[in-house]
Amino acid sequence: MKASKPLAATISSLWLVTLGLCLNALKMSCSQLVVDRVDPLVNPGIIGSAHLHQIVGGDSFNATMDPSDDPAERSTCTTCTFADDFSNYWTAVMFFRARNGTYKRVRQQGVIFHEDAREGGITVYYLPPEADHGRVTAFKKGFRMRTGDPGARTAEEAARFQHIDYTCLWDVGERFSNRSVTFPRDPCPAGIITTLYFPPCWDGIHLDSSDHYGHVSWPLQGEIDKGAPCPETHPVVIPRVVLEIQWDTREFNDPDLWPEDGSQPFVWSFGDDVGYGSHGDYVFGWRGDALQRAMDDVECSNLLCGLPQQEISEANKCMKDRMVPEDIDGWLETLPGLTSEDNSEQEGDDSPPQCHMKRR
């Protein structure tokens, strides 16, 4: 049942206050489509990519994601509450490493107001710059990009990606305090939120680049929120896509489960146990001009946007079978796709594993 207008207005107002959102901004819940070892941007065509991902969005997600294919046309459903969004969004998966060296996948939970999303999923934001930079140009068919570097292992290496952070939750309404750029060092009573911001500037020409970064950019100095302009090489302002994932770490909060040396026990599915390598991928798939209309509508705010919506219960029905048949939920000797040597060395790159299946 959809929220009544007064309730929707109340929720929207609360989001504006707690999250600092502005008008012509979207926020939606996207339940989990699948958890799988597939990455069509980094390892196109390969079933059995270097590490495990959690994916949300349209059910046309596949190992190739040919740029000539339109997810809005090929998908039969989407896990997102804005019914015109068949884009795909994916991130790495968090694991808990026990004292005996085995790994357990950390489950996700829906963030506040989105608790019913299947397997937690991802909360997705499309935000305009808070400073006036003129019209925000929506993405075009075939557009895709990445943010974050899975190979980053120092603060300097991670610094070129603005606003990739972790929030240690003391309660479910927590958002802005207890933030860090690495995994929290102490148990978090209500879980951990990871946040990924994608670049807000585009060259206006290329829908992709060989590394999936070069066609987009951050302001060269400062942040776009604080008035910093896009560089001349990437002059077109695009929506700031933000991914927010809440990890339910509560079952691992017993200090007796944590390493005896005082270090924290969480690790990304690509082997990073510090946190600088957090990253995400995006393939655009909105139907028609829906996203541009939302960005042009100064009264558009979260739920109150005039775009078709579906209940989260309907979005939860949209799912895919995993393409790589492997155990991802038991206590594992190694992270899926990585060898024991990879796990111990914390390599964390995106090169394909030695054993894989090529999609025919």
Image: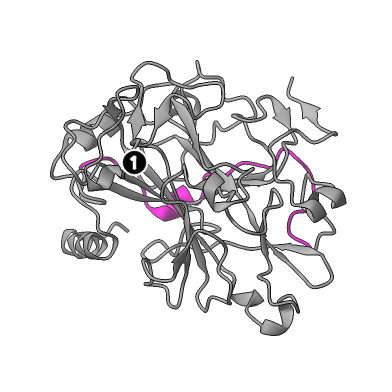
Q: Residue at x 72, y 36 (%)?
A: 49
> Who is closer to the viewer here, 282 or 186?
186
Is residue 311 found inside the magenta-colored segment of the image? yes
Which quarter of the picture shows residue 308? Answer: top left
State which quarter of the image contains the N terminus. bottom left
Could you tell me what secondary structure mostly forms the magenta stretch?
Answer: loop
Q: Where is residue 310 shown, x and y percent of the image?
A: 36, 47
As drawn, the residue found furthest toward the left would be 299
Please rate how many residues cluster around mark 1, counting C-alpha atoms within 10 Å: few if below 14, some from 14 to 19, many from 20. Answer: some
Above-or-below relation of 341 to 167: above
> Who is closer to the viewer here, 249 or 271?
271
Q: Where is residue 224 shown, x and y percent of the image?
A: 28, 42
Above-or-below relation of 227 to 119: above
The reply, left or right, for residue 291 in relation to residue 277 is: left
Give the magenta range.
Answer: 306-330
Q: Is residue 285 visible?
A: no
Q: Where is residue 247 shown, x and y percent of the image?
A: 55, 63
Is residue 213 found inside the magenta-colored segment of the image? no
The amino acid pointed to by label 1 is: Arg
The reply, left or right, for residue 102 in relation to residue 168 is: right
Q: How is the image coloured?
A: one colour
Above-or-below relation of 31 to 143: below
SS at circle 1: strand
Q: Report the label total.
A: 1
Q: Where is residue 329 shown, x and y percent of the image?
A: 73, 59
Q: Which residue is mark 1?
A: 240
State which quarter of the image contains the C terminus. top right
> Who is closer to the viewer here, 222 or 68?
222
Which quarter of the picture shows residue 112? Answer: bottom left
Q: Residue at x 22, y 64 (%)?
A: 17
